[in-house]
Image: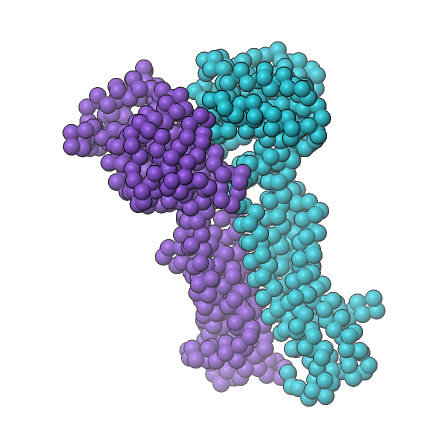
Amino acid sequence: MKFAKLIRRNLFRNKLRAILTMLLLAVIFFFVATLLAILENFENFSNAGEGANRLVVQSAISLATLLPYAHEQKIRDIPGVVDTAKLQWIGAYYKEKSNFFANFAVDVNKMPTVFDDYKIDPKDMAAFAADRRGALVGKDLMKRFGWKVGDRVTLKRQIFPFDPELTIRGTYEHPVQTTSLFFPMEYFEHAVGDRSEVGTFWVKVKDPKQMSVISQQIDAMFKNSDYPTETFTEKEFQANFLSMMGNVKLLFTAVSSCAIFMVILLAAITMSMSARERVTEIAVLKAIGFEQRLVLGLMLTEFILLTVIGGAAGSYGAHYLYSVVDMGKVTQGFLQNFAIHTKTLMICLASSAGVGLIAGGLPALRASNLRVVDGLRRVV
Amino acid sequence: MIPLKYNIGNLTARRVSTLMTILGIGVVIAVMISMMALQNGVNSAVVSSGSKDNLMIMREGAAAELSSWVTKDAFRIIRAMPGIATDNGAPMISPELVIVFKMPKRDDPKGSNVLVRGVTPMAFTMRPYVKLIEGRMFRPGVNEVIVARRIRDRFVNTAIGDTFMFGATKYNVVGVFDAKATAFDSEIWCDADFLGQARKRDAYSSVIARPTDHAAFESIKAAIQNDNRLKLDVKSEYQYYADQSNGLAGILILVAIVTFFMTIGAILGTMNTMFSAIASRGRELATMRALGFKRRTILLSVIVESAFISLLGGIAGLLLALPVNAISTGTTNFVSFSEVAFNFRVDANVALTGILIALIAGIVGGALPAISAARMPITKALREI
């Protein structure tokens, strides 16, 4: 610690250069932290049903193909199945097309058994169940549109030929999934003319160990029918949407790596400049008895400090910004509950330290390896 | 004016750091160009698909063909309307049935939704750029399909001779087509009647019609929209595909974020190196001032040098980014709920934009260092070691 002052003075020996380098690192790590957080946000989305022991049955043709109601009773009869609920994606929007959010028609009376991890006030649940045109809305969705319980809202059609006219009867809470709207299946059936077909069945299973067996059992049962099924765990089902977006993970990782590579190159220039400037000084230090290793250590500490300060400013800046600005609103619902978590912050700090080490390693090594005589003789 | 030779001499004198700067800016520009190429590819695969001459008729309020239906009766009513162009005596009107099949990808067994379009021969007449390039055409009424090349390249079991099962029906691939990078390049086509029977659908999804002229375009549109029996919406085919880009907002947001940060990165990067570059030759610049070079001349010289480095960086970036042209990939359009296959497309526009951004970053990033170089007090700089 007795060298702290020396390091500090060296760090800011050229204030402008130090600040510019830090700024560059801050910008890049703000960016990298954002990308990583988006990835995490996507992955988090697929954790919505974690531990809820739910399977999702969809048509093997595609999610856009509906399944006959008759399938449901057969699924419910499988031993180990607690209960099932029909769920239909409506795909309507509120006022503007950009106000896109998840809205479903659901078997209301099955919510307590199948979606038992959704926290709903019993009074809300009763009010929701009593109204054929009621809606149950996630807390964060209420916030997004500034809705209150009792509000009447009309959604606009995109898929089915009706505009749902609903009265909000209650809200629900959930650790992950808080941005959906549910309304009764009866309303949907009535509006589209009793087609008795639905997009998905959600199956509550008693024992998590039985999930894969039951899922195979369901698919085998309908394999040769006109309506073959494909059954996923809730997590796989959500992950399918991610994989539909394409290889987002590869894209983000590639872009982040390129950004970090660029920073290494540009930081290396500054650092070699800074090392070259003080060759004489280092020779003096060595002449008065500083060991080579100590000199190297001091310089590396300085360089790493430089990049870590920049990286920390960027990633914590992003952390702060996203905690103040509601990204759900800014991105029109694309990023919900967007935040930069500790894990991402740690990754960014570690990478910025890595940048300092890689970019500053060679200049520091060269400077500390210089023979005292050469260092003193050199005119900078 | 200080000769350019001086700047070039400077760059070669600091060879390593010049190269590193060029490479650094190059990487930034390469990422930026790749992102723009991605956006370009997606855009051309969605927006540029439809013709302004064709009418697209779908169910009221349906955002995509997948969620639309047009009954056969409605089709007959529309076909009889005056003002529809003819081709060798046949009215240019194409009923189409659209279904999506979830098919496994080569690099992702979870797969993605591929749009399957049931058509009549008129669909090919109305979209002359859809051309069979391998194999043969499907025959009417049987379980034969032709597959877009981009789908064949990326999905399993879609080459000529392959078969795949959906429900109780087996589909035989007999041909491959190319649709000039439009949305149809992400589709599988087959006979409309066969597909309707296979999937038990007795209505079409959409009807495409070609009016004889603009007046007919408006009159048919009005006639359909005013007919209460039909409950159909009409827009131009071009408009339909332009609206589809709503489903790709995610990708476009990403491109905007990347471009924004990368530009700031490039500016800060050049600024940083240019400050270092002038710092190491303070005495030199002061000498030049002492010799009589004006502040303005020094300022310009530094900016020119900075712009030159960034320009080289931009060119390096373009070269680095060119290989992405070969990448053919896909994403899902969440409005049409189906796969959009696209190629990264680095065209002249994208390339020039990338180089221009590099140049601007060089000028902006060089400005501050240039000002500080020009303002340097001569005596102080000359005294400095």
For the point 31% across and 27% down, the residue is: B141
Camera-side residue: B97 or A280? Answer: B97
Q: Nearer the viewer, residue B344 or B122?
A: B122
Residue that extends furthest to the top in the rendered view of this protein: A130
In percent of width and height, residue A324 lies at 65, 42
Residue positioned 63% across, 16% down in the render: A77
- Residue extending farthest to the right is A2
- As drawn, A337 above or below A172: below
| Residue at horizontal 64 percent and vertical 33 percent from the top | A48
Q: Position of residue A287 (x, y in %)?
A: 78, 84
Q: Is residue A228 visible?
A: yes
Q: The N terminus of chain A is located in which quarter?
A: bottom right
Q: Is residue B60 visible?
A: no
Q: Residue furthest front?
A: B161
Q: Colour of chain A?
A: cyan
Q: Work out which quarter of the rendered image holds the C terminus of chain A and state it.
A: bottom right
Residue nearest the viewer, comparing B382 with B75: B75
Q: Quadrant of residue A168?
A: top right
Chain letter, purple in picture: B
Of A63 and A192, which appears nearest the observer? A63
